[in-house]
Amino acid sequence: MFNLFIYLIYVALVLYIVDQLIRRERCVWSTQLALGVVAIAITPLIISWLYTSYVTAVPETHVPYLVSKPISDAEDLLRQNHLQWAIMDRVHNKDIPPGSVVSQYPEGGRAVKQGRIVQLVLSGEIPKILVPDLISKTLDQAVPLLNEAGLKLGTISEEATSEFPEGMIIAQDPPVGLEITSGAAVSVMVSKRSEPLPENPPAEPETDAGEAQ
C-alpha cells in the first residue's frame, strides 16, 4: 500500500514549502521548526503502518444470516465466522419464538473484518400485566385504568341489585391482581336499578254466609 516514490515527492514538497516560508519570513531554522518538519514528514509513514497493521492485515469474513435462529445456533455461527456479538434488546414478536433472533446488524451476507461485533435483537416473552381493581368504579373510571395498564374492556353485563348504586362495577373477570398478557380484555358486571316488587292487591273482606242469604 505504501508507495516510496510518492512519499519522497511528499517529503520534498514539505521541505520546499518550509524553505519558502523561511525565506519569506526571514527566519532561521530552529529546533522546534526542525521537529515540526520531521513530524509532518513521518506522518504518512505512521498512517501507512497503522492501516497495514490494523486494517488490511485483518482477514475478512461474511456475516451469517441469523434472523429466526435460536440464540444458541446464532452464537455457534458467529464463532465459526470469527465474529463477536452483543444482545442489544429483547422485543415481543408473534412470528418468532422467544429466545430467537429478531434482527441483526450488520445484515446477513455482508463482508466484514473478523472480530466485528454483530448487534442482535432477540424475541422475548409477552409481558405480563396485573389486572387493576375495577370494583366500585364506573365504566368511565374503569376504561382509563385499563388503557393505562395496556388492557381493554371486554363484555359488559348487568345485574339488578339494591346494594350498589346504578352503573357501578360489582364484579370483574379476570379478578384483580391476576397476571395476564398485554392487550387482553377484562369483562365486567355493572349494577342496575332493581325493579320494585309488585304490591299485593288488597284482600276482599270475607262475607258471612248468613248475610249472603
Image (cartoon, grey):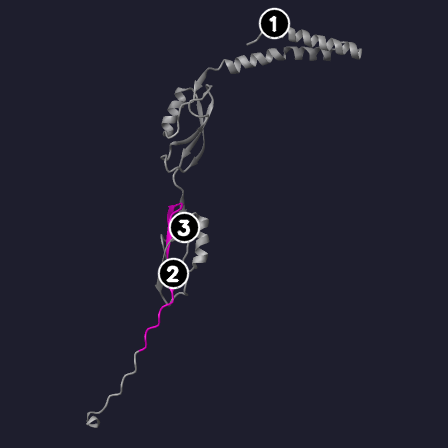
Cα–Cα span, label 2 and label 3: 16 Å
**Would you call the spot at circle 3 few (<14 residues within 10 Å), some (14-19), or many (20 or more)?**
some
Identified at 43% across, 51% down, the residue is 146
CB under 8 Å between discs 3 and 1: no
Q: Which residue is mark 3?
A: 152
Residue holding disc 1: 5
Q: Position of residue 27 (x, y in %)?
A: 79, 11
Q: Amino acid at mark 1?
A: Phe
Q: Amino acid at mark 3?
A: Lys
Q: Which residue is mark 2?
A: 190
Disc 3/disc 1 C-alpha distance (Å)? 75 Å
Quadrant of the image occupied by residue 172: bottom left
- Visible residue check, residue 27: no
The 10 Å Cα crowd at callout 2, few under 14, some 14 to 19, many 20 or more, is many
Q: Nearer the viewer, residue 197 or 178?
A: 197
Inspect the magenta stretch and tell me whether residue 201 lies in it: no
- Range covered by the magenta-colored residues: 177-199
